[in-house]
Amino acid sequence: MRSSLATIALGLVLFALPAPTFAADGDPPASPEVAAAMQPYMDQYKLAGVIGVVADRSGKVHYKNLLGYADVEAKKPISEDNVFWIASMSKMFAGASIMMLVDEGKVSLDDPVTKFIPQLGKWMVVEEKDPSHVLLKPPVRPVTIRHVLSHTSGLTGSSELQQVTGSDSTPLKARALSSVTGPLQWQPGDKYAYGNQGMNIAARVVEMVSGTPYETFLQKRFFDPLGMTETTFWPSEAQIARLAGAYGPNKGKTGYARGGIVYLTKPFSDREHRFPEAGGGLFSTTHDIFRYGLLLANDGELDGKRYLSHAAMDELRKEQTGKTRVNYSLGYHLRNGLFGHDGAYGTDLSVDPGTGMVAIFMVQCTGGDQWAARDLFLKTATKIFPK
């Protein structure tokens, strides 16, 4: 009788826990260390579902954890089939696109932005400001491509136009031109302030130099050749049906509260009224992010095709914020020897150029706990990665 009660109790406990996804024969094993690190976040309703991948530059996946749910209400386990809003991970492609044009001799990082968008010569800088007045002065130096990609341009996070119309409801051309109404909040190069406006200006430069819409440039230069078949600014209805739910704890912290993607305009599939948001508009999958991670881990080359030169990759891997000394490059975070980028809801790609580790963290968290969870995942991934 005691044995039967114990069995029933164990069953109830297992039913209450997030559903595990077991690896099929031949699949990479799950890491017990990653599972243990993430479990407290799931027990406290901070994360509903997690995909964690630890691989090397050869493409071998050493560990793959699929924990919890993509849809809590329907008890649907998270899976590699899920689509994620990768948000600011989009910035990586703005930086890589510019560096591809640098490789082709069409752009220099120290080119003034006005070389490509002359109307931005009207930028002014806030010299003094209080409730009764604002004093503007001309920039003491030009805003360069390097400045807009490293968040040191003096631009605010988003343009006044975006603040009124939304992040993605006007073309890149309009958003870039509208930045002159800003004004710049400090002299170019003097300070660092994270935002999306600079990335959209960089994307507009890509359009001007290549003669190609930014989304087409990404598709032809990165997504198609890399086999990133699900990475897009406009997920289809079928992809949206596979979108992992975004969750955080409810007010009482007794369960999950479902959120949404309020930063972008619905319907997400609308190509007529929505435009590329280079700083945070992409959707993607674990597979696609892994493909891009392998490109980064292999110094800009993959499957015999070189996308970016060694010199270009060096620029993406080094600090670019000047005297501010912030650990940021050209659309890439630099963190504890790793480089890559994260997104607002916690998605993250981090690559170790030395060891070749590729670490992918896919979550959709609205509660603010994604950063601590991501940091712990990366710490754990670095620890378990075969030396």
Image (cartoon, helix red, strand yellow):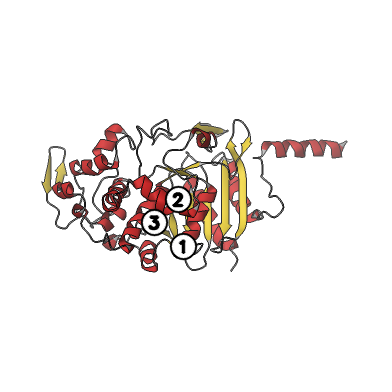
Q: Secondary structure at mark 2?
A: helix
| Quadrant showing the N terminus | top right
What residue sits right under mark 1 in the picture?
305
In the picture, residue 6 is in which quadrant? top right
Residue at 79% in and 35% down: 8
Position of residue 249 measured from the top left corner of the image (x, y, whole percent)? 52, 36
Q: Earlier in the sequence, mark 1 or mark 3?
A: 1
Evaluate whether residue 126 shows in this view. no
Residue 365, above or below 381: above
Residue at 16% in and 44% down: 129
Position of residue 321 measured from the top left corner of the image (x, y, whole percent)? 30, 60
Q: Secondary structure at mark 3?
A: loop
Callout 3 amino acid:
Tyr
Q: Earlier in the sequence, mark 2 or mark 3?
A: 2
The crowd level at tag 3 (other Cα within 10 Å; few <14, some 14-19, many 20+) is many
Residue at 20% in and 49% down: 117
Q: CA distance from mark 2 to mark 1?
A: 13 Å
| Quadrant showing the C terminus | bottom right
Mark 1 and mark 2 in contact (Cβ < 8 Å)?
no
Residue 226, numbered circle: none
Residue 223, numbered circle: 2
Residue at 57% in and 45% down: 50
Callout 1 amino acid:
Lys
What residue sits right under mark 3 in the picture?
332
